Amino acid sequence: MQDRSFVASVNRAFSGHPASVGESYSQHFVVAGSFGWALFKASLACFVHAVLPFLFVKTGSLAITELHTRMVTKRDRRQIAASHHQA
């Protein structure tokens, strides 16, 4: 009985948040990974910019703007879809 409870807890831990944003675990892995990769590249550009301020002048801010737009657009589409299902 304890094993089932543990398995259920682990399952919830890996599926709870992805489900809350309308994704499966694998979909969330891809989306979150793409955000992480974009942030990683932007952070490298920011470190180079710190040393050589004439390089990558807008790279960090553009990356943040693009990621924010992706996240908000997806959230808005999900909210619109949810409101259509409720109607």
Image: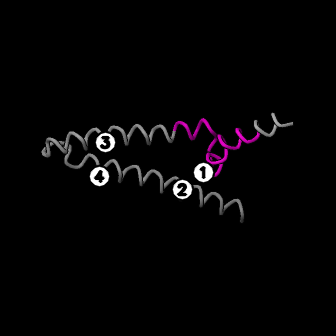
Ranked by sequence position, the earlier of labels 3 and 2 is 3
Q: Name the residue located 80 percent from the left edge and 40 percent from the top edge.
A: 5
Q: Which mark is residue 36?
A: none
Q: Name the residue located 76 percent from the left edge and 40 percent from the top edge.
A: 8
Q: Which residue is mark 1?
A: 21
Q: Is residue 28 above or below residue 71?
A: above
Q: Mark 3 and mark 1: span between their CA atoms?
A: 26 Å
Ranked by sequence position, the earlier of labels 3 and 4 is 3
Ranked by sequence position, the earlier of labels 3 and 1 is 1
Q: Secondary structure at mark 4?
A: helix
Q: Which residue is mark 2?
A: 75
Amino acid at pointer 4: Ser
- Identify which residue, 49 or 4, lies in the foreground: 4
Q: Mark 4 and mark 2: span between their CA atoms?
A: 21 Å
Q: Residue furthest bottom?
A: 87
Measured as percent of width and height from the top left, residue 20 is found at 64, 52
Ranked by sequence position, the earlier of labels 4 and 2 is 4
Q: Secondary structure at mark 2?
A: helix
Q: Which mark is residue 61?
A: 4
Q: Secondary structure at mark 1?
A: loop
Q: Name the residue located 71 percent from the left edge and 66 percent from the top edge.
A: 87
Q: Is residue 68 magenta?
A: no
Left or right for 24, reference 69:
right
Q: Residues within 10 Å of mark 3 (few under 14, many from 20)?
A: some
